[in-house]
Amino acid sequence: MRKIVFLLLLAGLTPGALAAKRVNVQQVEELLAQERGQPDAKAAKMLAGLELTERASSARLARWQESFPGSETRTALLALADASAFLHLPASEIPALAAPDAATQKQIVSRMVEYVKTTVPRLPDFLAKRTTIHFDDQQQRRTRHGRHKGFLQPLIADPETPSTPGLFHAVSSTAVVVTERHGWEVAADGSGGGKSGDETDGQSDLLTAGLTTSGEFGPILAVVVGDALHSRIFWSHWEKGASGPLAVLGYAVPAENSHESVSLTPLGDEVEPQSPAYHGEIAVDPEDGTILRLTVESDTDWLGRGFQSGIAVEYGSVTIGGRPYICPVRGVALSRAAGFHGVDSAGARIDFPAREFLNDVTFTDFHLFRAEMRVLP
């Protein structure tokens, strides 16, 4: 059974005591109106102290960023919006429509299942560029010692910038080529896993601590819908879509039915895969069952360490080989881990403070995958 994968490697950094100012979407709109025309760094600093209580949609984020050309402000807006990916939209973006009757709900689910059965097999083999911006709840600097006894520790804390839960700082950006063959992400060596290509910014050591995901194309759809159908799936609400209202279905999957794979490596290099209970939402075009947004959130404290992880994927039309297909266009991954204690190989105690990681992922540059052969002289 194919699984969607989250990978979190913790770094031992100092916990913080600061707190974010919680605001709703309308309050952010008002603050941005006041900040227009201000220096880039000033506007970014203001945004860095905020935490949304509602979800900022991708369309709203695009409007915000269009109004602020400065790179620091645009990045701060991205972090602010991405951290809200698992919240509900503002009430103004929820259509005032009655819930469909039971028969119509069943029909929407059937259309969604049929869509999953047909959309992945119809995708051609292709290449796409996956660009990831990695955020952390603490500004970081590199350590000269890349490895601690029994614990991977490529980054250490800057004492002047303590960890601040809910507030994120961009720490690196990478771009890799994803090869999609037969509905599965293939690495450069031909194996599965979705890790292909090279980092573009030369900060590969930064990537050894943080959050990694794969399976945003075919696997996540098949896994989540399959698990949900064997567990519990239910009507949630309507949301505004680009071309009409979207039907949002909720689901809950117990651990015994879970095929989500989450790996936490708190000590050493051994990966400990887990399949926790999880829940989320699926936003569907009610007319044809096309899935346009999907969220997956692991249930609270499944490791006994206050660890949570989540991924949200948005789908849109892309052109591959001159034909339109529905593919992932962006995603958000978020992980949180409460502090806990460990012991290194020498028996010494190691403290692992609470940490948060956030990834913003975009998929672009879709091309058909073609094998090429040359005859050498």
Image (cartoon, grey):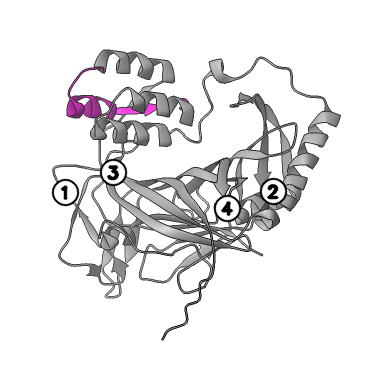
Kindly identify the amino acid type of the residue bearing the numbered disc 4: Gly
- Pointers 2 and 3 in contact (CB under 8 A)? no
Disc 4 packing (10 Å; few <14; some 14–19; many ≥20): few
Quick check: 137 left or right of 216? left
Q: State how far apart marks 2 and 4 are (Cα).
A: 28 Å
- Pointers 3 and 1 in contact (CB under 8 A)? no
In the image, residue 278 lies in the stretch drawn in magenta: no
Residue located beneath label 1 in the image: 158
Percent x, y of residue 44: 24, 29
* Label 2 secondary element: helix
Name the residue located 14 percent from the left edge and 47 percent from the top edge: 159
Name the residue located 30 percent from the left edge and 57 percent from the top edge: 200
- Which stretch is magenta? 36-57
Percent x, y of residue 304: 48, 53
Residue located beneath label 3 in the image: 170
Quick check: 374 left or right of 106? left
Percent x, y of residue 305: 44, 52
Above/below status of 161 relative to 247: below
Comes first in the chain, label 2 or label 3: 3
In the image, residue 42 lies in the stretch drawn in magenta: yes
Q: Residue 262: tell me if it is visible.
A: yes
Comes first in the chain, label 3 or label 1: 1
Comes first in the chain, label 2 or label 1: 1
Residue closer to the observer: 34 or 166: 34
Quick check: 199 left or right of 224? left
Tell which tag, 3 or 1, sits nearer the viewer: 3
Comes first in the chain, label 1 or label 4: 1
- Quadrant placement of the C terminus: bottom left
